[in-house]
Image (cartoon, coloured by chain):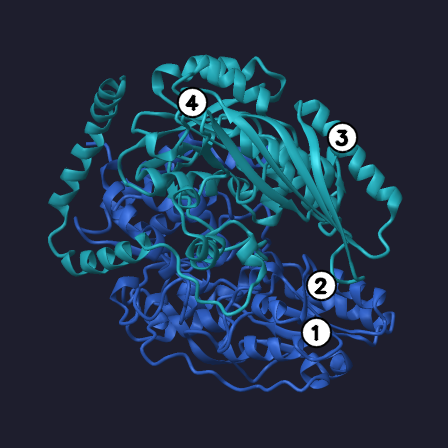
């Protein structure tokens, strides 16, 4: 309906940069061999990452290139179907009635199990609630399965389960089915939790990467990196004292408010493992657009920035557990931002960038310093630098 | 991070860039470039993180030097580390960014996946703590880095000796900055006009050790800090030297670096380490007296003596041209194996190992840099 308008808006905005690019060509001349090399790299980069490893290592679970390669080569290869191939946070499935449900699952193995602002129990509920919310659905029921190590304290289990109950109440979901397994000592590290959930997708809501267009804006619902830094500090091996609470929270209500204010919202994702950078990269690739972020607009707490600076980690790759990244058409941006900021979980919401058509598949950060750089997918976990 | 913000002010950056542009215009004809090498990996990181290369005028090019401490570790040493890590009963500790550096046969993360007890630490003192907490296990620390990290390894070893922690040892791969700098300067095909001297290393060794750079090789050197404005200001200082016909060691990073360095840290280094006769550098080959080993007083804590270390040299592939890239002789894309046999996923040489290496950076960002950067200049 409004497609034509959007396209025009995007195209006219992009004209200056196209002009700039054609000017560049005038400078070239003796670059042809370099161009050949660059083209070859480009072709190589466009291919999906390939699995070359013989054994699983921690990088395969980190949400970066190694994870993508594993999922592609092992899971999608074996289970292949259209719903799975959409590679979303959850599946959207049609019911005979014509309604659609969103269905998602997630496992939780965090260490330490308790950190400032939450516990593995909070994450287990909020994680699945949020995955379903990102499909635009309102989650109603979730399941919970526990893999427990022989000798685990029942008191601690009670505490974790109490956290889950509180989180479920807060999110307005019921935990309606479950499973318990006990494994030998050493076969698991304390307790692992899997949750799965379903929710109904309201009619007319269709959030996909493919619907994202040049000219759309990138919004984040608040401070980034809180959860990841909270857990890193709580592990206690950094020698840092400051307490940053995790941002773990259910986002279903925030999503409802957002969609009411900005009904043409294109795409939602909660930037958990791999952070904002990974979500933007996945989006750029799937939608074949450029995601241009403004460093000066990124909401990052001073303590989080400081901790990341010390560790040599980029906060863009650090996990969040209570934030959403939304792509919204330009004309609905103000309404979307106002709706987010009116909710306690979105007080620090900000427009952090926009979608352009060139260079497709790439995430660019305009640095506060006046330069720019590419924000690439990581292979695995961000590793602290020594120097 | 207010302390940091004042060194990242875009308005001040524009002033510095204009200065650079004007100075360079007076020094090289149109279309030609001045090439400055930043020696330290920390500088390279700043340059990428803040996008400094694309605010610089075309007349100034930064060449990324050999100062990334994990990238210069040769494959054979990584294989040795893995062999120690896979020795039954060993807890092997390493800085995070060493975990993915490939040896001849895999990296430490893969060894961990095969069952080795490899743990990431943020300081060698953490490794010593692990040793004290696990008296029935052998705990080895994989020591890498320049004079910046060597003092903390030295202090840890002194503590281990003082407390008589016998199940702790260090696999020492500390290297020194001056010999590779000399090796680069010695090369007859050198195409560099000046150096940004390493900031963190210089807090330890001071500015004096660099005097040979202008003295013998007639190249200016400015010791630089790690914030974006530090880098730009250091480039201005190099250009001013060239304009004035001066050639000397200057210090831009005066808030941290003193000419004489840190005498106490140097004492500690002398107490624990001695120079190796020679050490292999990935991409640069063997360089004499370029690395440290534990001296006789600390040999009881030397992992190379305690464990059966294969010590097999894995030669850099012949086609690898890292040395020439580092010297600014060729561009990354001109290397014979660039983008074919050598990629960030399967790196051959030092320049491709770290995301900050010259080749990895070019592989990831090269197309974009060329397409987007040129029209920054005002008419």
Tell me if label 1 and label 2 are in contact, CB under 8 Å: yes
Please state if A228 lies on the left or on the right of A2 as rendered: right
The residue at 33%/66% (across/down) is: B325
The residue at 24%/50% (across/down) is: B27
Tell me if label 3 and label 1 are in contact, CB under 8 Å: no
Same chain under badges 3 and 4? The reply is yes
Chain B's colour is blue
| Residue hosting label 1 | B170
Asked if residue B88 is positioned above or below residue A220 in the image, the reply reads: below
Same chain under badges 3 and 1? The reply is no
Q: Which of marks 3 and 4 is nearer the N terminus?
A: 3
Q: Where is residue B296 in the image (x, y as percent from the top left)?
A: 74, 84
Asked if residue B122 is positioned above or below residue B25 in the image, the reply reads: below
| Residue hosting label 3 | A165
| Residue hosting label 4 | A205
Q: How many neighbours does mark 2 have within 10 angstroms: few (below 14), some (14-19), or many (20 or more)?
A: many
In this view, the residue in front, A253 or A138, is A138
Q: What element carries label 4?
A: loop
Please state if B232 lies on the left or on the right of A242 as rendered: left
Same chain under badges 3 and 2? The reply is no
Query: In the rendered image, which quarter contains the N terminus of chain A?
Result: top left
| Residue hosting label 2 | B124
Same chain under badges 1 and 2? The reply is yes
Q: Mark 3 against mark 1, which lies toward the viewer?
A: 3
Chain A's colour is cyan
């Amino acid at each position: 309906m409004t497609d034509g308008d959007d396209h025009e808006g995007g195209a006219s905005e992009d004209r200056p940069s196209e002009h700039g690019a054609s000017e560049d060509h005038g400078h070239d001349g003796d670059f042809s061999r370099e161009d050949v090399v660059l083209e070859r790299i480009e072709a190589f980069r466009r291919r999906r990452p390939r699995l070359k490893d013989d054994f699983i290592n921690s990088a395969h679970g980190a949400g970066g290139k190694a994870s993508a390669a594993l999922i592609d080569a092992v899971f999608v290869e074996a289970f292949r179907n259209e719903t799975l191939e959409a590679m979303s946070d959850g599946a959207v499935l049609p019911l005979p009635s014509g309604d659609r449900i969103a269905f998602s699952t997630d496992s939780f193995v965090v260490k330490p199990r308790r950190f400032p602002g939450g516990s593995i129990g909070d994450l287990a509920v909020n994680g699945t609630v949020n995955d379903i919310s990102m499909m635009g659905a309102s989650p109603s029921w979730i399941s919970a399965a526990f893999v427990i190590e022989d000798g685990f304290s029942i008191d601690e289990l009670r505490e974790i389960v109490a956290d889950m109950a509180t989180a479920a109440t807060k999110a307005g979901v019921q935990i309606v089915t479950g499973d318990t397994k006990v494994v030998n000592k050493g076969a698991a590290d304390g307790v692992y939790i899997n949750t799965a959930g379903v929710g109904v997708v309201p009619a007319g809501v269709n959030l996909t990467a493919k619907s994202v267009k040049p000219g759309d804006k990138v919004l984040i619902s608040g401070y980034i990196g809180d959860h990841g830094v909270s857990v890193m500090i709580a592990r206690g091996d950094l020698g840092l004292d400051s307490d940053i609470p995790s941002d773990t929270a259910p986002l279903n209500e925030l999503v409802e408010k957002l969609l009411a204010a900005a009904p043409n919202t294109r795409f939602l994702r909660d930037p958990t493992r791999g952070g904002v950078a990974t979500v933007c990269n996945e989006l750029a690739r799937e939608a074949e657009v450029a995601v241009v972020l403004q460093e000066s607009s990124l909401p990052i707490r001073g303590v989080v920035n400081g901790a990341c600076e010390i560790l040599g980690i980029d906060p863009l790759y650090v996990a969040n557990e209570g934030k959403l990244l939304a792509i919204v058409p330009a004309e609905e941006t103000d309404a979307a931002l106002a709706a987010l900021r009116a909710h306690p979980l979105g007080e620090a919401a900000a427009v952090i960038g926009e979608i352009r058509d060139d260079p497709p598949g790439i995430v660019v950060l305009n640095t506060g310093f006046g330069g720019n750089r590419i924000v690439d997918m990581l292979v695995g976990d961000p590793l602290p630098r020594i120097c | 991070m207010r302390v940091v913000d004042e060194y990242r002010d875009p308005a001040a950056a524009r002033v510095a860039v204009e200065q650079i542009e004007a100075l360079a215009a007076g020094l090289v004809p149109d279309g030609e470039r001045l090439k400055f090498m930043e020696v330290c990996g920390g500088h390279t990181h700043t340059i990428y993180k803040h996008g400094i290369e694309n605010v610089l005028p075309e007349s100034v090019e930064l060449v990324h030097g050999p100062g990334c401490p994990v990238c210069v570790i040769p494959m054979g040493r990584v294989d040795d580390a893995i062999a120690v890590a896979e020795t039954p009963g060993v807890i092997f500790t390493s800085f995070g960014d060493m975990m993915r550096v490939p040896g001849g046969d895999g990296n430490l993360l893969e060894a961990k996946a095969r069952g080795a007890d490899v743990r990431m630490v943020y300081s060698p003192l953490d490794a010593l703590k692990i040793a004290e907490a696990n008296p029935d296990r052998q705990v080895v620390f994989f020591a890498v880095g320049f004079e910046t990290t060597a003092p903390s390894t030295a202090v840890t070893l002194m503590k281990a000796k003082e407390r008589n922690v016998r199940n702790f040892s260090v696999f020492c791969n500390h290297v020194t900055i001056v010999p590779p700098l000399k090796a680069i300067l010695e090369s007859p095909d050198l195409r560099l006009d000046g150096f940004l001297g390493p900031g963190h290393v210089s807090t330890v060794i001071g500015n004096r050790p660099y005097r040979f750079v202008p003295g013998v090789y007639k190249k200016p050197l400015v010791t630089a800090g790690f914030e974006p404005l530090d880098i730009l200001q250091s480039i201005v200082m190099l250009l001013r030297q060239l304009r004035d016909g001066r050639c000397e060691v200057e210090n831009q990073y005066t808030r941290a670096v003193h000419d004489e360095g840190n005498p106490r840290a140097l004492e500690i280094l002398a107490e624990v380490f001695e120079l190796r006769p020679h050490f292999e550098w990935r991409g640069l080959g063997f360089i004499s007296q370029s690395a440290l080993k534990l001296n006789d007083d600390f040999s009881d804590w030397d992992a190379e003596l305690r464990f059966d270390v294969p010590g097999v040299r894995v030669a850099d592939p012949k086609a690898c041209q890292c040395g020439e890239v580092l010297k600014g002789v060729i561009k990354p894309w001109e290397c014979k194996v660039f983008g074919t046999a050598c990629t960030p996923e399967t790196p051959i040489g030092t320049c491709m190992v770290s995301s900050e290496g010259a080749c990895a950076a070019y592989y990831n960002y090269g197309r974009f840099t060329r397409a987007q950067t040129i029209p920054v200049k005002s008419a």
